[in-house]
Amino acid sequence: MVEKLEGICFKGCEVLPSFFQNGSKEFHNLRLLDLTKASPNMVENFIQSQNLNKLQWLCLKECMIQKLPNNLFNCCHLQVLHLMKCNCLQFFFNILNQGFNMSACVDMEELSPSFSKLNALLELNLLGCSNLRELPTSIGQLNALQELNLSECSNLQKLPTSIGQLSALQNLYLNHCWSLQELPTSIGQLSALQNLYLNDCSNLQELPTSIGQLNALQNLYLNDCSSLQELPKSIGQLSALQNLYLNHCSSLQELPTSIGQLNTLQNLFLNNCSSLQELPTSIGQLNALQNLYLHDCSNLQKLPSSISKLSALQNLYLNDCSNLQELPTSIGQLNALQNLYLNFFMKVNNLGFYFWNCVCSCDLIINNTSFHLSCMPYFLRYYPFFYLFIFCEL
């Protein structure tokens, strides 16, 4: 009956159970094998003693192996190989598979050029390979690759120009790559790219102009890029962009006028952009924008009157904008606005005028307390201190 087994789990085993040691048990139908935290001897002995021609899924997570068993290279149907946190793994050889997970292999300093032979590879996960400094040029030959995860590769200094040849790539993760200072111009050739993650790339100073060529890009994550001072004008060419994340970009001083060309943008995140002083007038051209996040933009002094043209805007977040002196009177023309988030102690001089001339049905959120603007006389009656604060210049 054991010959019919399709899956076995030896998680945490130090030695091969006696049931398997005599070599008489062969698992010709084995498709799934879990050796998580198994000892190196256990991994070597079992894989070497079996004919694993039908094996499709193998997990060697947290195994202290230095190299992969030779017999593993005969697994012609292997599709997924997990090597997360194999901290001692130093060598990689050619295995034809669809998903290759080597996350947290901290001793891995380089990848073999043989990666170019992985023609069926769909996903490559190198999350947490903190000693990895560069990728081989041959990585551009992975024609089927759809997802590349290089997050937390803290010593990765650059990407090869050949990365632009990954014609099927949809998701590129570069979060927490602290040594990365720039992206290659060839990144604009990633015609299938939908999501680009660059969160906490603290040394990234600029984006290449070619980024505007990413016609399929839907989400661009640039949170905590503290050295990023500006966005290229070509950002306005991202015709499919729906979400732009710029939270905690403390050096970002302005947005390019071309940002108004992002006709599909639904959410713009600018929370904690402490150097941002104003928004471009062109922001009023964002016809699809539903949510505008400006929380804790401490140097933001005013909003352009063109903000009234944001016909789809539902939520406007202005919490902790301590230097915001006024709101444009035209803000009352935001017909779709549902929630306006402010602080109780904001130095806004003409806020009361907005209340009385508001043509929208909107909730004012002050310190997490909601007040509907149609009930403003009641609000001012029971909160006279706020009444004096918004009508008197302090």
Image (cartoon, rainbow, N blue to C red):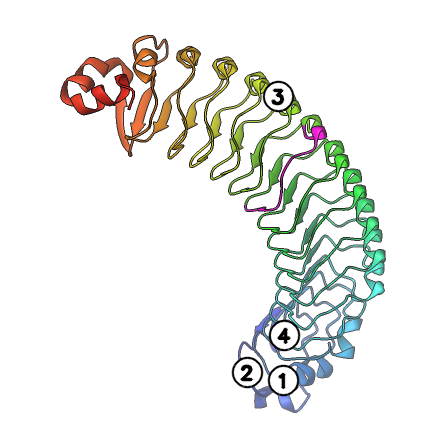
Q: Position of residue 384 (x, y in %)?
A: 16, 21
Image coordinates for residue 247, horizontal then vertical, percent: 51, 40
Q: CA distance from mark 3 to mark 1?
A: 60 Å
Where residue 165 sits in the image (x, y, percent)?
83, 45
Q: Amino acid at mark 3?
A: Gly
Q: Can you identify the residue that label 1 sits on?
A: 42
Residue 217: x and y in percent read: 67, 35
Label 2 sits on a secondary structure element that is loop
Looking at the image, tell me whether mark 2 or mark 4 is earlier in sequence order: 2
Note whether 244 is above or below 182 in the view shown: above
Residue behind mark 3: 260
In this view, the residue in front, 204 or 80, is 204
Q: Decide which of tag 3 and tag 2 comes sooner along the chain.
A: 2
**Amino acid type for the residue under numbered disc 1:** Met
Residue at the disc numbered 4: 87
**Which region of the structure is painted magenta?**
224-235
What label sits on residue 13 in the rendered view?
2
Is residue 227 part of the magenta span, yes or no? yes
> How far apart are the alpha carbons under marks 3 and 2?
59 Å
